[in-house]
Amino acid sequence: MCRRWHDSEPCMNYRCPHNLFWEELRLNLDEIQITEKALEIRNCCCLINDPWTPGDIEDIWGLTRRKIRQCEAMAWRKVKKEYPYKRLKKQIFS
């Protein structure tokens, strides 16, 4: 169970899908350092109030900006592939 609302300590339960370092993300935890930004929200993605910039993501997960852009591009490709009818509808009615 996620402890995000009950505890002031950072969550170290890497099996919780709300944890920034969730084990299913397959992050290299040896290279990742828990930063002030992560501690501010107690490692819980449910406590993120504002969208993060690529710089914030870089600081939290230790990813390069190039890798972040690659991940974003891959996510957009998946969204477009999953919802092709929206693109077709947009092309028809544009």
Image (cartoon, rainbow, N blue to C red):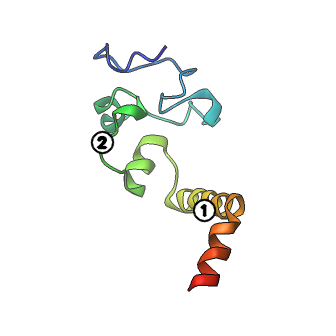
Q: Position of residue 74 (x, y in %)?
A: 65, 59
Q: Is residue 40 above or below residue 51?
A: above
The residue that appears at 63% across and 75% down in the rendered structure is 89
Give whichever of discs 2 and 1 has the lower sequence position: 2
Q: Residues within 10 Å of mark 1 (few under 14, many from 20)?
A: few
**Residue type, label 2:** Asn
- Mark 1: secondary structure: helix
Asked if labels 1 and 2 touch by Cβ distance under 8 angstroms, the answer is no
The label number, if any, that marks residue 49 in the structure image? 2
Secondary structure, mark 2, is loop
| Residue under label 1 | 76
> Does residue 35 appear left or right of residue 2 in this picture?
left
- Residue 46, image quadrant: top left
Give amino acid for label 1. Trp
Residue at the front extreme of this rendering: 93
Residue 75, located in which quarter of the rendered image? Answer: bottom right
Q: Residue at x 30, y 42 (%)?
A: 49
Q: Position of residue 65 (x, y in %)?
A: 49, 60
Vertical placement of residue 81 versus 25, above or below: below
Question: Marks 2 and 1, how far apart in space?
Answer: 23 Å
Is 92 on the left-hand or right-hand side of 36?
right
Q: Where 91 sits versus 20, above or below?
A: below
The quarter of the image holding the C terminus is: bottom right
